[in-house]
Image (tube, rainbow, N blue to C red):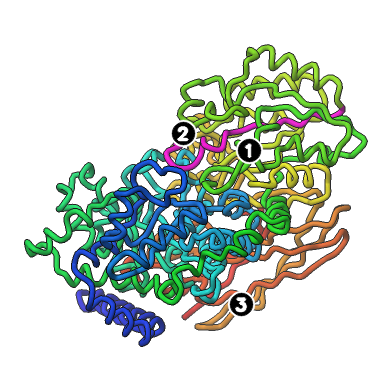
C-alpha cells in the first residue's frame, strides 16, 4: 500500500519539477540577467531592501510638489521600489525624476494603481463583465484600461481579481467573476492578455497582478478578511484554477490575500507562495502583499513586527505594500541571522526584473508621453466601446408580456433613487473614474424618448447606519432627500399615474458592495420595496432596472414586476447603455455568473455542488423528511448560474454525440442546433456541462466545461459543436494528482445550468 501511494506522489513531484524548469527556461533572458547581476553587485543591503518597499508618499501634498520632503528623502536614499495610488501626470514625472536623477543607484520606480474595471473610461464592474461571457470584449476592456492608465504614467494595475466566491454576503463578489472556476479561468487569461499584451516594454501595456492569492472569496460568514478553512481538494479543484490560468497566461505579479490558509496568513504561507505558486506553477514574477497585510499578521497572532516580516520574506513574499515592515526590520534580521541575505536578493531581483521588462531602465519616462496623455484618455471611441460592452453585460431576468423593449410612443415614468444618480453609475473600485462625467439613466432616456417623466420616489435606504457605512450620504446626489419618505412616494405616485409604463431604478448603492462591504441582509432596502409595491398597485406595465454588485435575494421583488433587467453598475456610459437596451437598440445577452438565492439562508450557494447521500428526489421543491433540504425553503435558487433571457427566443434541438463509448485519448464531438425563433436578432450563450458519474472521490453534479456565444438573426439556425477530450474530464484526486478516471460521463448542453439536455457516454482509459 505504501509503494502504491508513493508512486503517484513521486510522479507528480517529477512533473512539477519539469514544469518549473520549463517555465524558468522560457523566461530566461541572459541580457537581463547580466544587467541585473551588475546592478545588484553595486547595491547596498539597504538599497536592496528599499526595492521591496511599496508605499504611498506620506504627508500632505502641496500644490506644485510631487512628494513632500520626507518622501523625497526616502526616494533619494533608495528606500522605495514602487509608488502606490499616485495620480497626476506631472506628479508622477517629477517623482520618477527624483528616483532616476537624485538617488545613488538611479533605479526607476514602478507606479501602481487599482485599475480594476477601466481607468478614466469606466467599464461595468467585473462581475458584470463576466456576465457577457465574451472573452474578446473582456480582453478589450482591459486593453483600453491599460492604454489609458499607461498614458497617464501608471504601469502596474492590481487586477484581475480571481477569487471564486459562492457567498453574496461578501462584498467583493462585485470585483470577481462569479462562482465557476472554468469561466473564471477563461476570463483570467483574457484580462492578463488585455493588460500586458505581447510586449510589456510597449508603452501602452502594464503589469497585471493576480489577486488575492489565495481563497479570499471564501471567508467564514461572508465577512471580509475573515478566516478561510477548506480542504486542499477543494482548493485545487474549485478555487485555484483561475489563479493558475493567469500564471500560465504570463501574469507578471501576484498579490497575497488577507486571510489565512491552513492556519497561516497568506503573506507568510510558504506552501502557497513558494511550493504552489513557484515550484508547481512556475511563476517567476514578484509577489506583493495586499495593503499592510504583513503588519496585520501581528493581530493574527504570529509575532511582533520583526517576526512577521521575517516570516513573510522567507515564505517568498517579495514586496511589502505600505506597512514598511521590511524597510524597518529586515536589515536587523539579516544582522541577527534570522533572515538570509539571499532571500532579500531573490526578492529584489524579481522586482528589478519587472522594471527591466517594462523597459524602465532603458527609458524611465516610457509611460510619460505627453502626447498620449492628451489624446488617448476618455476618448469618444473608448466611451463608445464601454457603452457597447455594457449592453452585453445586462441580464434580462424576467420579461412577461414582452414589456421590454419599450415602444417609442409610450409615455414613461422613470422613478427611483438610482435613476438620476451619477455617483452610483461607475461601481465600486473605480478610483480613477470621475462620476461627474457618468451618464445617468435619466440622461440616457432623455436622448431616446421625448415622453419622459421623472420622480425620485425614495432614498436608497432609510437605514441611516447602512447609508453612512456604505458612503451613501457622502455625495449630494445620493444623500437623503429633504423631502420626507411619504412626500417622495406621493410625488412618484402622481408622476406614474400620468404614464403608460413605469420604469423603476432600484437596488444597491455602489459602495454597498466592494471591499469592507459585507451584508447580512442581501435584499433590496425595504423603503424601495414600499415604492415598488405602490407602483404595482397602479396596475400599469412595470419594469425594474436592478443596480447591484452581488447576487441579491429578490423574492420580495420579482413577483411584483413585469420585467426585471439587471444592469449591475455599468460604468461611464451606464445611462446610454441602459437606454439602448430598454428601447430596443440592443438586445440583452448577459447570463448570470453567480447564483441568485431565494434567501440568505441558502448561502454559500453554487450550481456545481456535490450530491449528498440523501438528495431530495422530487423536482417540485417539496419538503422531504430525512433528506437534504430545508423546512422553510426549497433547495433550488431563485435564478440559476448561466441564466439570462433575450428579447427573442432560442430553440435547442436534441443534440448528437459522435460516439457513445470511447477509449483513451479519443475525442468526442457534441453537436446541437440552436434556432432563433423570435422576431429579434440576438445572441445566445450555449453552455456545455459534464458530470463524472462515478469517481474515486465525490464529484459535482455538473461542471461547466465549455461555452460559445453565438449571434443569430431572426429565423436563423446554427449548429454548435463542442470538442471534448480527456483533458476536460480531469480533476485532482485524493493524492492531488490531476487526472481522469474511466467510467460514465453525462454530457449536458443548454441555455443555463438548470435547463439542459443530457446524454451519457462511457469513456475507458
* Residue for point 46% across, 61% down: 156
Residue 302 image position (x, y, % from top left): 18, 48
Q: Which residue is mark 2?
A: 519
316 sits to left or right of 180: left
Viewer-nearest of labels 2 and 1? 1
Residue 136 image position (x, y, % from top left): 65, 66
Q: Which residue is mark 3?
A: 668
- Tally of numbered tags: 3
Q: Which residue is mark 1?
A: 547
Earlier-in-chain disc, 2 versus 1: 2
Alpha carbon separation for disc pair 2 and 1: 16 Å
**517, above or below 608, in the image:** above
Viewer-nearest of labels 1 and 3? 1
- Determine if residue 156 is in view: yes
* Residue for point 61% across, 40% down: 435
Residue 518 inside the magenta-drawn segment = yes
Residue 132 image position (x, y, % from top left): 65, 56
Range shown magenta: 500-519
Category of crowding for the residue at label 3, using alpha-carbon neighbours closer than 10 angstroms: few (below 14), some (14–19), many (at least 20): some
Alpha carbon separation for disc pair 3 and 2: 45 Å
Give the camera-side residue of 699 and 579.
579
* Residue for point 50% across, 46% down: 173
Determine which of the numbered discs, if any, sits on residue 677 in the image: none
Alpha carbon separation for disc pair 1 and 3: 41 Å
**Which corner quadrant of the image does residue 262 belong to?**
bottom left
322 sits to left or right of 496: left
Give the camera-side residue of 241 and 294.
294
- Determine if residue 162 is in view: no
Amino acid at each position: 500500500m505504501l509503494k502504491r501511494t508513493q508512486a503517484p506522489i513521486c510522479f507528480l513531484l517529477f512533473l512539477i519539477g519539469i514544469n518549473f524548469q520549463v517555465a524558468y527556461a522560457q523566461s530566461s533572458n541572459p541580457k537581463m540577467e547580466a544587467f541585473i547581476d551588475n546592478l545588484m553587485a553595486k547595491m547596498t543591503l539597504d538599497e536592496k531592501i528599499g526595492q521591496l518597499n511599496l508605499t504611498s508618499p506620506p504627508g500632505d501634498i502641496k500644490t506644485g510638489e510631487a512628494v513632500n520632503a520626507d518622501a523625497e528623502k526616502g526616494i533619494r536614499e533608495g528606500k522605495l521600489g514602487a509608488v502606490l495610488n499616485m495620480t497626476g501626470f506631472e506628479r508622477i514625472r517629477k517623482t520618477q525624476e527624483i528616483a532616476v536623477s537624485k538617488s545613488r543607484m538611479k533605479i526607476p520606480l514602478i507606479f501602481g494603481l487599482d485599475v480594476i474595471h477601466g481607468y478614466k473610461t469606466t467599464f461595468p464592474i467585473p462581475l458584470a463583465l463576466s456576465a457577457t461571457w465574451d472573452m474578446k470584449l473582456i480582453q478589450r476592456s482591459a486593453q483600453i484600461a491599460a492604454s489609458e492608465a499607461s498614458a497617464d504614467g501608471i504601469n502596474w494595475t492590481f487586477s484581475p481579481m480571481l477569487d471564486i466566491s459562492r457567498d453574496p454576503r461578501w462584498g467583493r463578489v462585485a470585483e470577481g467573476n462569479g462562482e465557476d472556476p472554468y469561466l473564471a479561468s477563461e476570463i483570467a487569461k483574457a484580462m492578463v492578455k488585455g493588460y500586458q499584451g505581447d510586449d510589456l516594454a510597449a508603452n501602452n501595456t502594464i503589469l497585471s497582478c493576480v489577486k488575492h492569492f489565495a481563497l479570499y472569496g471564501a471567508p467564514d460568514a461572508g465577512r471580509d478578511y475573515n478566516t478561510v478553512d477548506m480542504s486542499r481538494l477543494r482548493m485545487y479543484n474549485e478555487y485555484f484554477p483561475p489563479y493558475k490560468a493567469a500564471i500560465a497566461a504570463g501574469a507578471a505579479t501576484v498579490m497575497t490575500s488577507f486571510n489565512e490558509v491552513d492556519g497561516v496568513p497568506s503573506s507568510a504561507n510558504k506552501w502557497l507562495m513558494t511550493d504552489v505558486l513557484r515550484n508547481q506553477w512556475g511563476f517567476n514574477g514578484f509577489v506583493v502583499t495586499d495593503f499592510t497585510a504583513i503588519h496585520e499578521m501581528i493581530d493574527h497572532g504570529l509575532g511582533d513586527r520583526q517576526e512577521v516580516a521575517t516570516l513573510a520574506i522567507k515564505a517568498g513574499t517579495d514586496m511589502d505594500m505600505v506597512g514598511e515592515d521590511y524597510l524597518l526590520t529586515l536589515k536587523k534580521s539579516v544582522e541577527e541571522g534570522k533572515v538570509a541575505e539571499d532571500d532579500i536578493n531573490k526578492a529584489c531581483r524579481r522586482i528589478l526584473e519587472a522594471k527591466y521588462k517594462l523597459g524602465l531602465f532603458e527609458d524611465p519616462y516610457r509611460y510619460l508621453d505627453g502626447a498620449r496623455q492628451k489624446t488617448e484618455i476618455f476618448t469618444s471611441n473608448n466611451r463608445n466601446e464601454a457603452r457597447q460592452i455594457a449592453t452585453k453585460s445586462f441580464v434580462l431576468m424576467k420579461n412577461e408580456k414582452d414589456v421590454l423593449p419599450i415602444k417609442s410612443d409610450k409615455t414613461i415614468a422613470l422613478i427611483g433613487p438610482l435613476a438620476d444618480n451619477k455617483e452610483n453609475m461607475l461601481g465600486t473600485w473605480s478610483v480613477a473614474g470621475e462620476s461627474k462625467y457618468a451618464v445617468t439613466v435619466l440622461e440616457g432616456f432623455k436622448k431616446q424618448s421625448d415622453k419622459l417623466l421623472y420622480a425620485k420616489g425614495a432614498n436608497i435606504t432609510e437605514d441611516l447606519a447602512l447609508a453612512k457605512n456604505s458612503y451613501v450620504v457622502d455625495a449630494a446626489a445620493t444623500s437623503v432627500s429633504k423631502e420626507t419618505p411619504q412626500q417622495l412616494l406621493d410625488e412618484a405616485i402622481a408622476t406614474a399615474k400620468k404614464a403608460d409604463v413605469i420604469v423603476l431604478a432600484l437596488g444597491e448603492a455602489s459602495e454597498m458592495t466592494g471591499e469592507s462591504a459585507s451584508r447580512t441582509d442581501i435584499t433590496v432596502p425595504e423603503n424601495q420595496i414600499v415604492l415598488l409595491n405602490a407602483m404595482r398597485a397602479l396596475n400599469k406595465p412595470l419594469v425594474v432596472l436592478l443596480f447591484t454588485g452581488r447576487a441579491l435575494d429578490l423574492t420580495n421583488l420579482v413577483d411584483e414586476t413585469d420585467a426585471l433587467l439587471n444592469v449591475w453598475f455599468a460604468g461611464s456610459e451606464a445611462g446610454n447603455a441602459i437606454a439602448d437596451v430598454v428601447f430596443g437598440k440592443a438586445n440583452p445577452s448577459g447570463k448570470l455568473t453567480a447564483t441568485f438565492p431565494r434567501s440568505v439562508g441558502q448561502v454559500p450557494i453554487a450550481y456545481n455542488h456535490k450530491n449528498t447521500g440523501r438528495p431530495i428526489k422530487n423536482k417540485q421543491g417539496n419538503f422531504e423528511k430525512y433528506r437534504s433540504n430545508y423546512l422553510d425553503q426549497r433547495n433550488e435558487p431563485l435564478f440559476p448560474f448561466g441564466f439570462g433571457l433575450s428579447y427573442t427566443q432560442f430553440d435547442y434541438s436534441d443534440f448528437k454525440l459522435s460516439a457513445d463509448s470511447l477509449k483513451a485519448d479519443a475525442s468526442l464531438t457534441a453537436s446541437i442546433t440552436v434556432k432563433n425563433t423570435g422576431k429579434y436578432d440576438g445572441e445566445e450563450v450555449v453552455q456545455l456541462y459534464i458530470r463524472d458519474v462515478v469517481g474515486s472521490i465525490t464529484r459535482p453534479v455538473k461542471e461547466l466545461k465549455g461555452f460559445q456565444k453565438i449571434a443569430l438573426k431572426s429565423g436563423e439556425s446554427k449548429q454548435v459543436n463542442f470538442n471534448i477530450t480527456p483533458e476536460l474530464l480531469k480533476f485532482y484526486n485524493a493524492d492531488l494528482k490531476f487526472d481522469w478516471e474511466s467510467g460514465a460521463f453525462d454530457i449536458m448542453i443548454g441555455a443555463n445550468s438548470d435547463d439542459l439536455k443530457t446524454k451519457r457516454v462511457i469513456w475507458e482509459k
